[in-house]
Image (cartoon, rainbow, N blue to C red):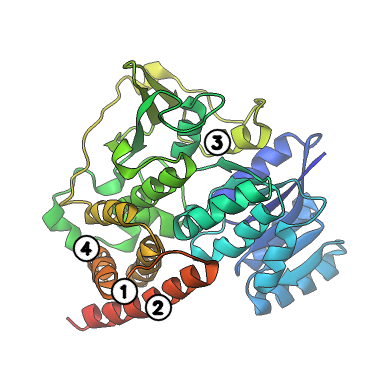
Amino acid sequence: MIGITVLGSTGSIGVNTLDVIAQHPEQYRAVALTANRNVERLFEQCVAHLPDYAVMSDVAAAEQLQKKIQAAGIETEVLAGADGLENVAVLPQCEQVMAAIVGAAGLLPTLAAAQAGKRVLLANKEALVMSGHLFMDAVREYGAELLPIDSEHNAIFQCMPERFNGLENGGIEQILLTGSGGPFLAVDPAELVNVTPDQACAHPNWVMGRKISVDSATMMNKGLELIEACWLFAAPPEKIQIVVHPQSIIHSMVEYVDGSVLAQMGSPDMRIPIAHSMAWPQRMSSGVERLNLFDVARLDFERPDDARFPCLRLARIVAEQGGTAAAILNAANEIAVEAFLDEALGFMDISRVIEATLADVSAQTAASLEVVLQADAVAREVAQSHVERLKLT
């Protein structure tokens, strides 16, 4: 029986992970579940999966959950805060950790899982984006396994040689990282100033949380994935090409020096990469509806438009710059997206806040976790000041 800690179990990735676990009760068990403030959803999951531990990031929410757990007579221990998250990421009865907490909040528990030598199922791209070589060094030093959950990175992983040892050694010319283009692919850029949060969150192919849905609409999600792919596959930014593919059927491709292009295809359902990473190097059923190419009928591809997606341009600049620049980018994006979802900022102002923050906060060598976290904190303050400035105009 393989024990799994699900960091962020109430989000879309967490829910899909628990669905896959439930399909294979003889092989997998949810050892610990965590959430931020969603007491009702986490309580329902505890009733269904009976984990050893449940963690709420918010202390008041943990107290509410504790009362509900006791009243239900469930033998699940409730923990709270950042320490609780890190504790369940290193449990001895846990072999795998699904890292699905959205944003920078997922960095420390995900890093703790790597330092404990766990199989880390990485859905929290921000952890790797922020800490870069520090995270990869921890994976190597402590003998952890790092398997990507983002559909694109999982697809690239599946298209790589079995014993991957760098692009050149594998005969790889470039990585083709696909993205749907989100809900505004065909909208005139001039009209994007009036976009509402609900419109930005209405993704045409994927069911996701609101923050990541906005990132998809700005294509910052693809920018963060570009940075993540550089670390995962030891690839320089110029070896990664972004390809807009509206159907989300080809999840990414790898081009080899002989002209071959390998593509991983499947229905746009996150249970595919989740099941793949949980069972790797074996395969197991995911419960996903089979891909019917006759229904798909056509596959389209185009280059991303910088005028429509300025966040993608900023992310590529940061990927080339290195150091703490990615942590600054990520922090500014989180602040700007939160302000947009609160209707305090316009959609096109998101990129303006990020660009202004990158200009104001100098990037440094990411020599330690403390340096990265300091850059994150400073960037949040600066980004918030730019949000306040734009709110007044």
Q: Please give left or right for residue 306 compared with residue 157 in the image.
A: left
The residue nearer to you, when weighing 14 against 343, is 14
In the image, residue 168 lies at what x, y percent?
A: 40, 29
Assess whether mark 2 and mark 4 are in contact (beta carbons under 8 angstroms).
no
Asked whether the beta carbons under mark 1 and mark 3 sit within 8 Å of each other, the answer is: no
User: Helix, strand or loop at disc 1?
Assistant: loop
Q: CA distance from mark 4 to mark 3?
A: 32 Å
At label 1, which amino acid type do we have?
Val
Looking at the rendered structure, the secondary structure element under dot 3 is helix
Mark 1 vs 2: CB contact within 8 A: yes
x 30%, y 75%: residue: 344
| 136, above or below 151, in the image | below
Marks 1 and 2 sit apart, C-alpha to C-alpha, by: 8 Å
Task: Please tell me how crowded label 4 is: few (under 14), some (14-19), or many (20+) other residues with Cα within 10 Å.
Answer: many
Q: Can you tell which mark lies on residue 348?
A: 4
Mark 4 or mark 3, earlier in chain: 3
- Which one is closest to the eye, mark 4 or mark 2? 2
Residue occupying image coordinates x 30% and y 82%: 385
Q: CA distance from mark 4 to mark 2?
A: 23 Å
Residue at image mark 2: 378
Q: Which residue is label 1 attached to?
A: 361
Q: Earlier in the sequence, mark 4 or mark 2?
A: 4
Q: Can residue 65 be seen here?
A: no
> CA–CA distance between discs 1 and 3?
36 Å
Q: Mark 1 or mark 3, which has the lower sequence index?
A: 3
Type of amino acid at the residue the image marks with label 3: Pro
Residue 137 in the image: state x and y as whole percent.
Answer: 57, 52
